[in-house]
Amino acid sequence: MATFAELVLSTSRCTCPCRSFTRKPIIRPPLSGLRLVGDTKPLFRSGLGRISVNRCFLTAVARAESDQLGDDDHSKGIDRIHNLQNVEDKQKKASQLKKRVIFGIGIGLPVGCVVLAGGWVFTVALASSVFIGSREYFELVRSRGIAKGMTPPPRYVSRVCSVICALMPILTLYFGNIDILVTSAAFVVAIALLVQRGSPRFAQLSSTMFGLFYCGYLPSFWVKLRCGLAAPALNTGIGRTWPILLGGQAHWTVGLVATLISFSGVIATDTFAFLGGKTFGRTPLTSISPKKTWEGTIVGLVGCIAITILLSKYLSWPQSLFSSVAFGFLNFFGSVFGDLTESMIKRDAGVKDSGSLIPGHGGILDRVDSYIFTGALAYSFIKTSLKLYGV
């Protein structure tokens, strides 16, 4: 086969009259291996037939292999690109998981200490979270997805509502019951919306009223649960060895034990549902959250009930197995439907996370959505179904 240099030397000759023309044999390369690229024009003939060359330069590509070999090389290159992309995706997911674990532990330990402290420490921490979560909620309401086809509430109304939501847990601790205060606040906000300039819309009223209920009133039940159920949890093993400087056995009330079990149940639901969905997940649970599956949800239910039973045996509350199982069911359903409610809000807003406050976790609402309904359900269950708080 002719080399590239031989081909160029044999075909590219100057035809100017200033130089003598010496006829040399032209080595004809195999036609199957020669590819001419460029704007060609026949310049002269040879004994081998017409030779076409580029006006300025002849680019000849001699291939020893068949065209199929080139396709294989191309495919291998694409495979290498895909492999690199897969490696980058895995590294990115590993980095996100590591970040989630680190910040999850960093958040979980202080939250555990706040729950153990109770009182004003617990209430103020809850009020701070409520304020940030309510700000995220009203930003979602004002986003392009939800606001499309509706008029969002004015910014001054949403800011006032965020402050009202943050005051609800504090007022709950001080007064014990805020039903009248919540009703009065809702009435004032409704008046502010109705007398605003322009044309008031029902969407403004409904989204604002739901924000007061969802972001302020429901989380306040955690204060009722943790601080309001002050009856001692008798026969609690850990309570008998609890330091006197930290409150002694009297510190371990029904409210503290119920809050710890509810928090643990929510964490167990999320963890087991995630692991079960990754391992067995096949059937989508709902279109609201496509990543959730029936298999993962069932595993989450089993995990929540198992953790609730184990903790109830260790903390000696509630006394009966039936009450423990029922309490686990309640925590599970509150967790799942709280998560789905926030997913529906984010879907209509067209966003993945409610915010970016917590690296790897999103916003406050992304972390506390499973707790919003759970506190109210747990408190109502204990007050109405467990005689003497299950002691």
Image: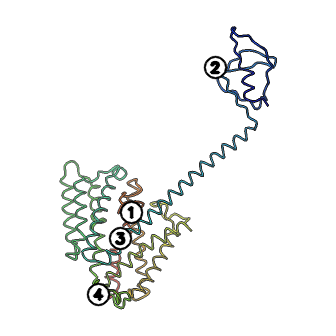
The answer for how far apart the CA atoms under marks 3 and 2 are is 78 Å
Label 1 Cα neighbours within 10 Å, binned few <14 / some 14-19 / many ≥20: many
* Residue matched to label 4: 244
Q: Point out the tag, 1 or 2, that comes first from the N-terminus.
A: 2
* Residue matched to label 3: 373
Q: Nearer the viewer, residue 337 or 234?
A: 234
Query: Can residue 346 be seen at all in this image of the molecule?
Result: yes
Dot 3 amino acid type: Phe
Q: Quadrant of residue 36?
A: top right
Q: Point out the tag, 3 or 4, that comes first from the N-terminus.
A: 4
Label 4 Cα neighbours within 10 Å, binned few <14 / some 14-19 / many ≥20: few
As drawn, which residue projects farthest toward the bottom? 235
Percent position of residue 272, x then y: 49, 72
Q: Residue at position x 82%, y 17% from top?
A: 47
Q: Point out the tag, 1 or 3, that comes first from the N-terminus.
A: 1
Q: Residue at position x 36%, y 91% from top?
A: 235
The answer for how far apart the CA atoms under marks 1 and 4 are is 37 Å
In the drawing, does residue 196 fall left or right of residue 55?
left
Query: Can residue 231 be seen at all in this image of the molecule?
Result: no
* Residue matched to label 1: 366
Is residue 28 shown above or below 271? above
Q: Nearer the viewer, residue 41 or 289?
A: 41
The answer for how far apart the CA atoms under marks 4 and 2 are is 97 Å
| CB contact under 8 Å: marks 3 and 4 | no
* Residue matched to label 2: 56
Q: Quadrant of residue 330?
A: bottom left
Is residue 127 shown above or below 34? below
Percent position of residue 227, x then y: 27, 79
